[in-house]
Amino acid sequence: IRSWHPAIIVTDICMPQMDAIELWNSLSQMEFTGELMLVSGQSEALRQQAGKLAGIKGLKVVANMQKPLNARMFGEILKSRLSHVWAS
């Protein structure tokens, strides 16, 4: 991430090598200034808490989506966010 400098990261909150809290801490330490799109099969309450924690860590969550994803909706959100990023 440090060398790549992504504008948007799409991530689950439960991953095999790292959980969301570890990722938020790492991104915060790297001073990541891009946007986060959260995707998870976890409960709405857990997804919302993960999003709030990311915000506390200074990260910008722009979407918080439930799995399974609606591909069309995901594509529209991603396209919208990329348009926003590229216009900046």
Image (cartoon, helix red, strand yellow):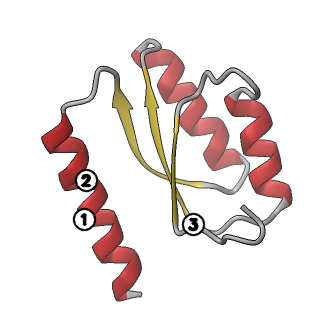
Q: Residues within 10 Å of mark 1 (few under 14, many from 20)?
A: few
Residue 48 screen position, x and y as percent: 48, 28
Q: CA distance from mark 2 to mark 1?
A: 5 Å
Q: CA distance from mark 1 to mark 3?
A: 14 Å
Q: Which residue is mark 1?
A: 80
For the residue marked with disc 2, what is the amino acid?
Ile
Which residue sits at x=34%, y=69%? 82
Q: Residues within 10 Å of mark 3 (few under 14, many from 20)?
A: some
Q: Residues within 10 Å of mark 2 (few under 14, many from 20)?
A: some
Q: Which residue is mark 2?
A: 77
Element on which disc 3 rests: loop
For the residue marked with disc 3, what is the amino acid?
Gly
Which residue sits at x=82%, y=48%? 26
Mark carried by residue 37: none
**In the displayed structure, does residue 82 sit left or right of residue 73?**
right
- Of callouts 2 and 3, which one flags the residue occurring earlier in the amino acid sequence? 3
| Closer to us: 33 or 55 | 33
Q: Residue furthest right?
A: 29
Quadrant housing the N terminus? bottom right
Q: How many marks?
A: 3
Residue 43, quarter of picture:
top left
Which residue sits at x=30%, y=56%? 78
Quadrant housing the C terminus? bottom left
For the residue marked with disc 1, what is the amino acid?
Ser
Residue 18 screen position, x and y as percent: 75, 29
CB atoms at circles 2 and 1 under 8 Å apart? yes
CB atoms at circles 2 and 3 under 8 Å apart? no
**In the displayed structure, does residue 34 sit left or right of residue 73?**
right
Q: Which residue is mark 3?
A: 34
Residue 73 screen position, x and y as percent: 17, 42
